[in-house]
Amino acid sequence: AEDVINPSDLTAVGQVTPASAADVEQALAAAQPWDAPAAERAAALNKAADLYEENFGELFAILAREAGKSIPDAVAELREAVDFMRYYAANIPPAAPAGVFTCISPWNFPLAIFSGQISAGLACGNAVLAKPAEQTPLIAHRAISLMHEAGVPRSALQLLPGQGSKIGAALTGDARVDGVAFTGSTATAMRIRSTMAETLRPGAPLIAETGGLNAMIVDSTALPEQAVQSIIESAFQSAGQRCSALRCLYLQDDVADGVLTMLKGAMDVLNLGDPWHLNVDSGPVIDAGARAGILAHIDQARAEGRVLKEMSTPQAGTFVGPTLISVTGIGDLEQEIFGPVLHVARFKSQDLDKIINDINATGYGLTFGLHTRIDDRVQHVCDRIHAGNIYVNRNQIGAIVGSQPFGGEGLSGTGPKAGGPNYLARFCAPDRQTSAETWGTTTADLPGETGVPGRPITTSLPGPTGESNRLTTSARPPLLCMGPGATAAASQAKEVIGMGGTAIEAHGMFDLHRLEFIQGIAGVLWWGDEDTGREIERTLAKRQGPILPLIPGHPDRARVLAERHVCVDTTAAGGNAALLGGES
Ligand code: NAD
């Protein structure tokens, strides 16, 4: 057994016995999709949510001691976990399960994301193999035992703690697995993509929610007090260990000095320490390795004279003081720094479009924040920024299930958004086509034309008064329709276009190797033989950039359409009226 360490004081919280290769084998052999009626599955998930709530004290204590969560963060985390379970229980689609689903989660939401992935898989009737992060097996174990107590069969839900490179790799590289839900870093998602391409059935779904380089723009009309509050929460809550956290702040030159002074003042009153204490705002980072990486980044910035402010930290534990670092723009950030480090850039009002382009050029697209009192500017920026979740005049963290479906685009994730209306479909069996023969022999046509994208559709989602929550679906880049054969390709394109998407017909002798480099596609439809399917998977897995799917059956909505969410604090008022006319 291995010790599980409390990051606040480096004492042991408990012990974990990692799963062995034999345990993985046994779990795969024992896994049985949960064939109870949907109503029964929903009842068990709702019961599990009740049990989570009843056991709040114990769960908070484990979250604080194992994951370094503050009490407000622990409350929010329990709420999110329970929301996921109830939301998925209430929205079970009338479809067969995919089969066996592997769920791999990160340590930063060790209860909420862990429970969210699992309950989605279970709601749809899958057997779930759950692999928590190395750092947080204790909360995972407690969660699984509460789900079992609520009536989830053991054959449908098994816990396999252990290292990603061993247990995670084994659980994503076995032909008995039908799909994978993963949340974690972009690099790990790419690795899993390659492993799956070699072993799983071609077309097996990978739902990957990954990292981001998240920006916020504060213009001269923003209310500084409100912007600073949002910045502090977005950058430093949970010690910056949220995928949604603000990494690069853009301040309009005209107000930058004032906002920075206020921001430094607000940092001065942040209280770092053992998160179990109610007066603590921010706890430690997760472990010594994470701390060393973040400190190396700060050291380099300090050596270059770019540290604007740095806070001291408690002695024991893996703490990192909240830090401000000056940058010229988001392009200076080479990677996601997963901690309480905020990069700050200045911009001139006439350069707004340039910084929007710079932000989009990172290739990530998770969250984005905007503080402005100009309605046209909200529209202008929201129309152009590529980010899955956009927040206006508020912080950019803490998405609420059902109100703010969450997930990124580009390098930040595949979708569908967790806690949203399109998520569960991906956990169901693909609607398979008939075999290749039905579609006739292949022909040698060259890529055909693209359909006209359907109009974006926006729906308002429920939320509190004073907040607008709107989910928009619009066409993704075209799906490559490879048939086989002209008839199949045409019918694939017709389906995609019928759903509001765009398609390229590329059936026949289309050179598979081109798939490794072809730009501007969102995935590949292939209804033919499995060997070619595997070749397509391997080639797609070699690509740099966003993870693209092979779709072996009818496409689901979320593969044809991209989902974007915009949340606006509609009560925001005030701002710096003196600057309202002086934009340029
Ligand atoms: P990580 O990628 O290191 O690990 C995530 C999980 O993957 C862990 O359970 C790990 O054991 C497992 N893993 C590692 N290697 C594996 C392999 N080869 N095969 C299978 N599984 C493997 O990420 P982390 O450090 O735990 O989490 C932080 C990252 O997660 C950040 O990048 C953050 O942005 C991201 N994140 C994203 C979201 C989102 O919704 N987009 C939410 C939370 C965290």
Image: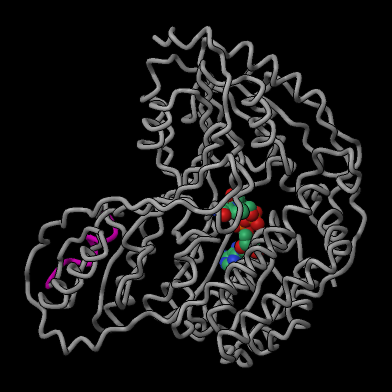
Colour scheme of the rendered structure: one colour
User: Residue 57, relative to residue 100: is it above or below?
Assistant: above
Residue 73 lies, in percent from the top left, at: 76, 49
Instruction: Tell which of 166 and 96 is nearer to you.
Output: 96
User: Residue 329, relative to residue 166: is it above or below?
Assistant: above
Quarter of image, res 480: bottom left
Which quadrant holds the C terminus? Answer: top left
Residue 469 lies, in percent from the top left, at: 50, 47
Which quadrant holds the N terminus? Answer: bottom right
Instruction: Tell which of 319 and 101 is nearer to you.
Output: 101
Residue placed at 30% from the left, 50% from the top? 456
Q: Is residue 185 visible?
A: no
User: Residue 100, relative to residue 411: is it above or below?
Assistant: below
Residue placed at 51% from the left, 86% from the top? 176
Left or right, residue 190 beside residue 527: right
Q: Residue 88 magenta-drawn?
A: no
Quarter of image, res 569: top right
Residue 51 lies, in percent from the top left, at: 79, 73
Residue with the most extreme front position: 465
Q: Is residue 115 visible?
A: yes
Left or right, residue 221 beside residue 287: left
Residue placed at 54% from the left, 52% from the top? 404
State ligand 1's quadrant. Answer: bottom right
Residue 60 lies, in percent from the top left, at: 84, 58
Residue placed at 69% from the left, 88% from the top? 153
- Residue stretch rendered in magenta on the structure: 508-517
